Amino acid sequence: IARAHDLGHALREWCAEVLAGDALALGRQRCALLSQLTGVDPDAILQWGFVERLVNGLLYVENGPQEHAAQFLTVAEAWAAAEPG
């Protein structure tokens, strides 16, 4: 679990590219690459990436700037509906 959590951090700050396309497909592609490089389950990486985005988005809602909150939460919403695999 700790390795997937650590790799989820790598997805946290990656906004512009994800928002410019299909957020879920791009997130899955990035998780597949991280999985190939590390042997960690790509679904676990995506799940932790989702948690990181949600938590940080909510922190930005509370503390600003709001445009950061919108970026984080938009991607989190797209990833929330992800089915494993």
Image (cartoon, grey):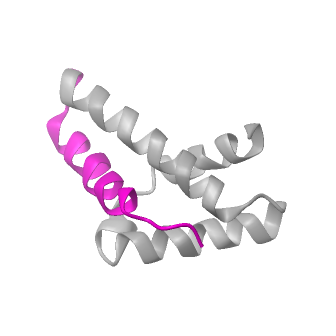
Query: Which residue lies at the image location 20% right of the left edge and 22% below the top edge?
Result: 62
Q: Residue furthest top?
A: 63
From the viewer's side, name the closer residue of 54 and 18: 54
- 15 lies left or right of 38: left
- 66 lies left or right of 80: left
Q: Quadrant of residue 53?
A: top left
From the viewer's side, name the closer residue of 15 and 5: 5
Query: Which residue lies at the image location 41% right of the left edge and 70% below the top edge?
Result: 24
From the viewer's side, name the closer residue of 36 and 17: 36
Q: Residue furthest front?
A: 83
Q: Is 31 placed above or below 57 here?
A: below
Q: Quadrant of the N terminus?
A: top right
Magenta range: 63-85
Tell me, yes or no, whether the highlighted magenta stretch contains residue 9.
no
Tell me, yes or no, whether the highlighted magenta stretch contains residue 69.
yes
Q: Residue furthest left?
A: 66
Residue 75 at what x, y percent from top left?
A: 33, 57
Q: Quadrant of residue 29?
A: bottom right
User: In terms of secondary structure, what is the magenta stretch mainly?
Assistant: helix
Q: Quadrant of residue 9?
A: top right
Query: Which residue lies at the image location 36% right of the left edge and 40% below the top edge?
Result: 54
- 63 lies left or right of 52: left
- 32 lies left or right of 39: left
Query: Which residue lies at the image location 35% right of the left edge and 52% below the top edge?
Result: 76
Residue 77 at what x, y percent from top left?
A: 29, 55
Residue 26 at what x, y percent from top left?
A: 46, 74
Residue 5 at what x, y percent from top left?
A: 65, 41
